[in-house]
Image (spheres, rainbow, N blue to C red):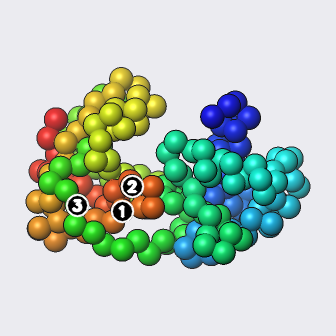
Amino acid sequence: MNKKSSEISKFLSYVLRHEPQAIGLLLDREGWAVISELIVQAKQAGQNLNDTLIREIVINSDKKRFAISEDGLRIRAVQGHSTNTVAIAHAEKIPPEFLYHGTATRFLDSILREGLKPGSRQYVHLSEDMEVATAVGQRYGKPVVLKIEALRMHQQGLKFFQAENGVWLTKQVPFRYIQR
């Protein structure tokens, strides 16, 4: 992804995941925004978008953070929302035996004491892939990957969901299910 595309992707993440009101954009309960409205509101905020550019970002995003609706008229972030106006109804799924969470070493003591919490987001994000978890952890400092006993959690009543891009979601991970 080139620099311009990366900047636009960050802008889309900001307004579709965290602050739609920053540009006067309305998201429905499932996180969908009308693409034509996004283009107009973004322009008023000084960001020049068009339908083709938005679709290129969605298609070429390595992390698949966004989805276009089946009718092609709407866009949403598939997970990572911190806005309380969005509550995507993900279908519950049975997770694999283990999932992984990447974080920075500076957070490790707190996590091992209190477990994983979603912070400002709605869910804790987990991956099936250690490399992806390592890359996530690197964004916050010296990375560490935690192994999560996901299937055992599920068997003991904790719910798991999977976003459209493959990221696993759960409300929390108590410390007893975390391995270093």
Q: Which numbered dot is residue 95?
A: 3
**Which type of secondary structure does the marked residue at label 1 adopt?**
strand
| Viewer-side residue, 101 vs 76 | 76
Q: Which residue is mark 1?
A: 162
| Viewer-side residue, 94 vs 113 | 94
Residue 61 in view in this figure: yes
Which amino acid is tagged 1? Gln
Classify residue 98 as left or right of residue 129: left
The quadrant holding residue 84 is: bottom right
Q: Which residue is mark 2?
A: 166
Q: CA distance from mark 3 to mark 2?
A: 11 Å
Classify residue 103 as left or right of residue 175: right
Q: Residue 52: x, y in percent?
A: 77, 53
**Which type of secondary structure does the marked residue at label 3 adopt?**
loop
> Which residue corresponds to the image point at 72% horizontal and 62% vertical from the top-left?
21
Q: Residue 142: x, y in percent?
A: 36, 23
Q: CA distance from mark 2 to mark 1?
A: 6 Å
| Viewer-side residue, 175 vs 90 | 90
Which amino acid is tagged 2? Gly
Residue 110 in view in this figure: no
Cβ atoms at labels 2 and 1 below 8 Å apart: yes
**Which type of secondary structure does the marked residue at label 2 adopt?**
loop
Q: Is residue 108 above or below residue 169?
A: above
The quadrant holding residue 77 is: bottom right
> Which residue corresponds to the image point at 74% horizontal and 56% vertical from the top-left?
22
Which amino acid is tagged 3? Pro
Where is the N terminus found, in terms of image quarters? top right
> Which residue corresponds to the image point at 38% horizontal and 54% vertical from the top-left?
167
Q: Residue 94: x, y in percent?
A: 22, 66
Q: CA distance from mark 1 to mark 3?
A: 9 Å
The quadrant holding residue 170 is: bottom left
Classify residue 6 as left or right of residue 65: right
